[in-house]
Image (cartoon, coloured by chain):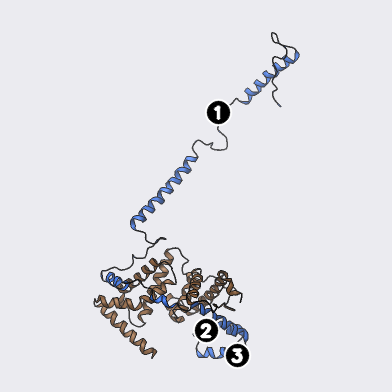
Amino acid sequence: MGSLVMNTARSVDARLVQESLAGNQASFQDLVERYQGRLFALTRRYTKNPVDIEDIVQDTFLKAFRRLDSFDHRSSFYTWIYRIATNTILDVLKRRGRSPVQTTEDPEILGDASVFDAPTPSAELEAREISEITQEVLSHLPDIFRCVLVMREYDEMAYQEIADTLGISIGTVESRLFRARARFKDKLLSLYPEYGER
Amino acid sequence: MICKEYRALISGYADDELSEAQAAPLRQHMIDCQACRKVLAGEVALKRWFEPEPELLAAVPSGFAERVARRAFDGDTGEALVPAGGSDHETPLLQFVLRLTAAAAVLLLVASALMRNVGLPAGDHLRAELNVPTNEEIIEQLEILNREAAVESAGPAEGLEPGSRTPRKVGP
């Protein structure tokens, strides 16, 4: 059933891409409408500025339109545009002086860190509160770690997809995820120590 | 396999990234190993912080898709949309003014640094412009005063009342 839905979605995407390439503006608008919500959600993981978010998502779709003829349908349209969005986001963050995605790992951060005894959100916390705390903690992480956490935890991307999107090996994905989770836990406990008391 | 090696697999297990050949022995190990079960529980607990907020998906500005499609078909490539600077939207004019201001500030700094040195002593010797007597002139003046004092201590000078002139004490 799930694969049927996926195949239907893929065929709809394929048709909209073809029609867009043929010059049908309404079809491209449909394509934008299908994925704009997910891209807005994705971009919000990286910046809270609504103007920036809209600019980045718009930029992503315009770049996608310009390269639409290079979309080969081997991956899903979302995977393809997700990669464009991620690169656009990281490019903007880098140009604005945020911690860039480095090609080398940070050797000092690992230590004995692990997610051992990781704190959990209390039952009373609303989904919105959990999300706000998580966003706050994520905003303190270097992009190199935030990126893999967002891809894995929010977008549920497989290690291979993350590796393909970022142009790194699966081993590096595993290593970064491990470090990212340890960093997340440490920052969570330093910002919200009450979650470490239980 | 030892416990440490199993631990390295736990993240992948929690992410459902292990093959069955890797997962089966790990599951077997965790039946007996409380510490590894605890690590897995920690991994699972951390994931609860990442549960999606449903309304995030709905928050898209109205008319967004239409605007983007129109711009795409108008030939907008999107490359110039994302500002490169630190502020939100720097126009070319603003960028020009900012650069001009920066250049003026640098010039001002250089000029003020140069002006600070004008009129100040240079080198190792002080160069004062005031009319100060030389050491020889001071010594000569002191000798005159001492002579006058010696004369006065010997007896009142001609034409002067006693005590009308107090010799000045000069020198240490």
Q: CA distance from mark 1 to mark 2?
A: 86 Å
In this picture, residue A83 sits left or right of residue B141: left
Say which quarter of the image contains residue B151. Answer: top right
Given the image, on which type of amino acid does mark 3 rest? Ile
Q: Subunit of mark 3?
A: B
Q: Of discs 1 and 2, which sits in the foreground?
A: 2
- Residue B14: numbered disc: 2
- Residue B31: numbered disc: 3
Identify the residue at horizontal 40%, vertical 67% (top origin).
Answer: A50
Q: Of discs 1 and 3, which sits in the foreground?
A: 3
Q: CA distance from mark 1 to mark 3?
A: 96 Å
Identify the residue at horizontal 58%, vertical 26% (top origin).
Answer: B132
Q: Identify the colour of chain A in the image.
A: brown
Q: Subunit of mark 1?
A: B
Given the image, on which type of amino acid does mark 2 rest? Ala
The image shows residue B59 at horizontal and vertical percentages of: 38, 73
Q: Secondary structure at mark 2?
A: helix
Identify the residue at horizontal 36%, vertical 88% (top origin).
Answer: A5
The earlier-in-sequence mark between 1 and 3 is: 3
Q: Identify the colour of chain B in the image.
A: blue
The image shows residue A183 at horizontal and vertical percentages of: 54, 72
Please report contact status of discs 2 and 3: CB closer than 8 Å, yes or no.
Answer: no
Residue assigned mark 1:
B130
The image shows residue A152 at horizontal and vertical percentages of: 47, 79
In this picture, residue A112 sits left or right of residue A4: right
The earlier-in-sequence mark between 2 and 3 is: 2
Given the image, on which type of amino acid does mark 1 rest? Leu
